[in-house]
Image (tube, grey):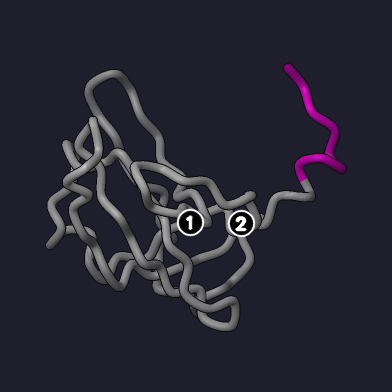
């Protein structure tokens, strides 16, 4: 499926920093609740099913790339306001991160 460049341009990709990671015990699958600081955009909450691939300690303080203008969605009782980007196979997952420290909220194109 192809999308137009105009549709793609509507997505707002930004650099953020994970400032909080918590378990979501009521979730059916192992997921974390994140708070991600996007600098001038503020702190957004996110739920992500990456618990099998990362410990809380590995994630805390990590810079990530996320889509920040998605419609909020409830995931296991948590309002998810953004989505971190990752590459994945059936057995591996790697979060997309800047290759050097960037200011929080920096646009990604």
43 displayed left or right of 95: right
Q: Please tell me which residue is depicted at 35% across the width and 29% down the height of the picture.
A: 88
The quadrant where residue 22 appears: bottom left
Q: Please tell me which residue is depicted at 83% across the width and 39% down the height of the picture.
A: 5
Q: What residue did someone put label 1 on?
A: 65
77 displayed left or right of 102: left
State the SS at label 2: strand
Residue 86, horizontal then vertical, whole percent: 41, 41
Residues under numbered marks 1 and 2 in contact, where contact means CB atoms less than 8 Å apart: yes
Q: Nearer the viewer, residue 36 or 108?
A: 36
Residue 34, horizontal then vertical, whole percent: 33, 60
Q: Nearer the viewer, residue 59 or 97?
A: 59
Q: Residues within 10 Å of mark 2 (few under 14, many from 20)?
A: many
The quadrant where residue 14 appears: bottom right
Is residue 2 shown in magenta? yes
Residue 26, horizontal then vertical, whole percent: 21, 42
The residues tagged by marks 1 and 2 sit, at their Cα atoms, a distance apart of: 7 Å
Residue 43 has which mark? none
76 displayed left or right of 7: left
Q: Which residues are magenta?
A: 1-8
Of pointers 1 and 2, the one earlier in the residue sequence: 2
Residue 13 has which mark? 2
Which quadrant is home to the N terminus?
Answer: top right
Q: Please tell me which residue is depicted at 79% across the width and 28% down the height of the picture.
A: 3
Is residue 16 shown in magenta? no
């Amino acid at each position: 499926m192809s999308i137009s460049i105009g549709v793609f341009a509507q997505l707002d990709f930004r650099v953020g920093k994970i400032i909080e990671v918590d378990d979501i015990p009521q979730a059916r699958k192992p997921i974390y609740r994140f708070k991600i600081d996007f600098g001038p955009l503020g702190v957004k909450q996110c739920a992500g099913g990456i618990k099998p691939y990362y410990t809380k300690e590995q994630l805390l303080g990590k810079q990530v790339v996320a889509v920040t203008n998605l419609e909020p969605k409830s995931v296991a009782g948590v309002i998810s306001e953004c989505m971190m980007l990752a590459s994945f196979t059936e057995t591996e997952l790697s979060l997309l991160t800047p290759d050097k420290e960037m200011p929080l909220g920096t646009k990604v194109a």
